[in-house]
Amino acid sequence: MESITTAANVLEVSEYEVFRRGHLEWYGVPPSPRALDHHYGRYLRGGCVPFWARRFAERVVAEFDRGRSSSAHAPGTVFWA
């Protein structure tokens, strides 16, 4: 759960948006609002984080920690979308 919050802080977006971007990056399409609400609700109620959201958040944090955040601003990059 901590990586979701940290990624949201790094990207200056909500945790909900971290879930949306994680899904978009993993599957290549945005999640339906219903699916996103379902996964985010499970996260809020019990801390259940889907693998695609966790992997996205961990990557955001790792890139930030390595000081590569400036290189992630390339046009077309889902990372910051």
Image (cartoon, rainbow, N blue to C red):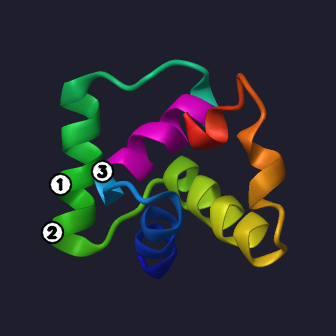
For mark 2, give the secondary structure. helix
Q: Nearer the viewer, residue 80 or 3?
A: 80
Instruction: Look at the numbered disc 3 and give the secondary structure of its residue.
Output: helix
Mark closest to the chain's N terminus, 3 or 2: 3
Q: Label 3 belongs to which residue?
A: 16
Mark 3 or mark 2: which is in front? Answer: 3
Alpha carbon separation for disc pair 3 and 2 = 14 Å
| Residues at circles 2 and 1 in contact by the CB criterion of under 8 Å | yes
Q: Which mark is residue 45?
A: 2
Under circle 1, the secondary element is: helix
Give the residue number, with chain letter if any, for mark 1: 41
Left or right of residue 56: residue 40: left
Q: Is residue 59 in the magenta section? A: no
> The disc labelled 3 sits on which kind of residue?
Tyr
* Residue 69 position within the rendered picture, expressed as x and y whole percent measured from the top left: 74, 59
Looking at the image, residue 50 sits to the left or right of residue 66; the answer is left
Image position, residue 34 (x, y; %): 19, 28
Q: Is residue 15 above or below residue 66?
A: above
Q: Amino acid at mark 1?
A: Gly
**Residues under labels 1 and 3: Cα distance?**
10 Å
Quadrant for residue 47, please give it: bottom left
* Residue sitting nearer the eye, 42 or 78: 78
Residue drawn where x is 82% and y is 71% of the image: 67
Magenta stretch, residue numbers = 17-25
